Amino acid sequence: MSSTEPAAVLSPRGLERLRTRHPWIYRSDTRELPETPGIYPVRDTRGRTYGWALVNARSEISLRMLSYGEAPAGQETLLARLQAALDYRDALAPDADSYRLVHGEADGLPGLVIDRYADYLVVQNGSAALEPHLEALVDALVQRLNPKGVLARFDNRSRTLEGLETDVFVLRGEVPEEVECREADVRYFARPYSGQKTGAFLDQRLNRQRLGSVARGRAIDVFSYHGSFALHLAGKVDHLECVDVSAPALEGARKNLELNGFDRVTYTVANAFDRLRELEREGAVFDTISLDPPAFAKRRADLGNAYGAYKELNLRCLKMLAPGGYMGSASCSFHVSDADFYLMLADAARDAGRRVRIIAREGQAPDHPEVLGIPETRYLKFALLQAID
């Protein structure tokens, strides 16, 4: 392609960012951008080609790099990346029928997320430049995996930022409101049309099993939502309390737990902060605690308040953790770094007057891969803790 054809032209600062191999380049770091979203060469002001990218001048993240060097990239590149992502999941051989198939930039497919729920697939796309290629990508998915249905969950905020319409609709076949899924030795209902993310939280899959492997005695699952952690605790403990502020969410948890025959469960509709304060006043003691709060720091500016909220929750839980008891504590806030998270846990343990052992430091399951040089691909922190005394 000649240098007179449409291309994304970078400023010197944009070229510096390009050299870090981070796939995102912001509008402020460009000199020229094509008006129509698409796949274009990335050049400097002298016309030298440095790579190819998904480009959208309307988005603050105007370039999402696909490849580096002069060799053109296009739809065949996208299809090859898709097959490589599916090969990787096959090699993982997860002990589940529901997991992530494509994890955006981590699989070289910026903006694209594809999750599998048993015989059904859910697709999210947050890149306007990728939109014209979705038909071919979905065709390739169907040919390889032969799902019963494929759903477009095009209701995420990133589509609005890209200037795309938002909607939820079936792309192929039929997709039910609920899909029964398996995760190790438990079953649950995913809700592709209305559930969080694409229907369920898949990234905590291995962490749930890890906490379940040591669960015992009296247990509590804080921020239970649909009971994803509770499912791995209920069969191992004497009694379990599920806490969530949403009554409909707890009804989902009840349905999932009853699906597995678990009945020694109490469901408490309450604000988690208020419930933990109440339990602490009552002198409650738990042998197993699951604490999986929402992302309190959705922006870097939220970090101070988020740190305080995470600390209060962990402090109250640690005060109620029995000697020798186990606690799983998580944060899904990208802006809360690993260092921040473990500093917060140390502060909480100190203020609770407890000695606490770290059994494991984990992140998201490997079907949500982390790529070196792209810190945004590592967002989930999970600590398995044990009270020493």
Image: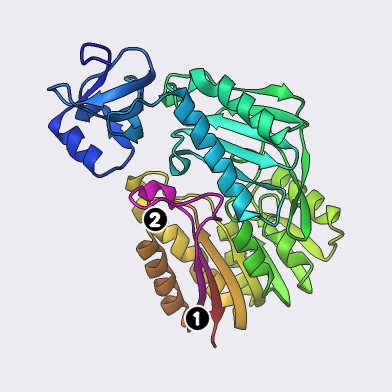
Give whichever of 75, 18 is nearer the camera.
Answer: 75
Whether 164 is drawn above or below 383: the answer is above
- Residue 132 in sight in this render: yes
**Outermost residue, front side:** 71
In the picture, the disc for residue 184 is none
- Which residue is located at x 66 percent, y 50 percent? 225
Q: CA distance from mark 1 to mark 2?
A: 21 Å
Name the N-terminal-most of marks 1 and 2.
2
Please name the residue shown 41% across and 25% down the image.
Answer: 161
Residue name at image x 31 percent, y 42 percent = 22
> Residue 319: which quarter of the image?
bottom right
Across and down, in percent, residue 350 comes to 42, 79
Please name the predominant secondary structure of the magenta segment in the image. Answer: loop
Residue 163 image offset from top left, x and y in percent = 43, 19
Find disc 1 in the rendering and name its residue.
357
The residue carrying mark 2 is 336
- Label 1: element kind: strand
Query: In which quadrant of the rendered view does residue 217 lie?
Result: bottom right
Q: Is residue 303 above or below residue 18?
A: below
Q: Quadrant of the C terminus?
A: bottom right
Where residue 250 sits: x, y (%)?
73, 50
Residue 275 figure quarter? bottom right
Query: In terms of depth relative to the viewer, which is nearer, 349 or 21?
Result: 21
Say if the magenta span includes residue 225: no
Magenta highlight range: 359-383
Any part of residue 284 in sight: no
Q: Amino acid at mark 2?
A: Val
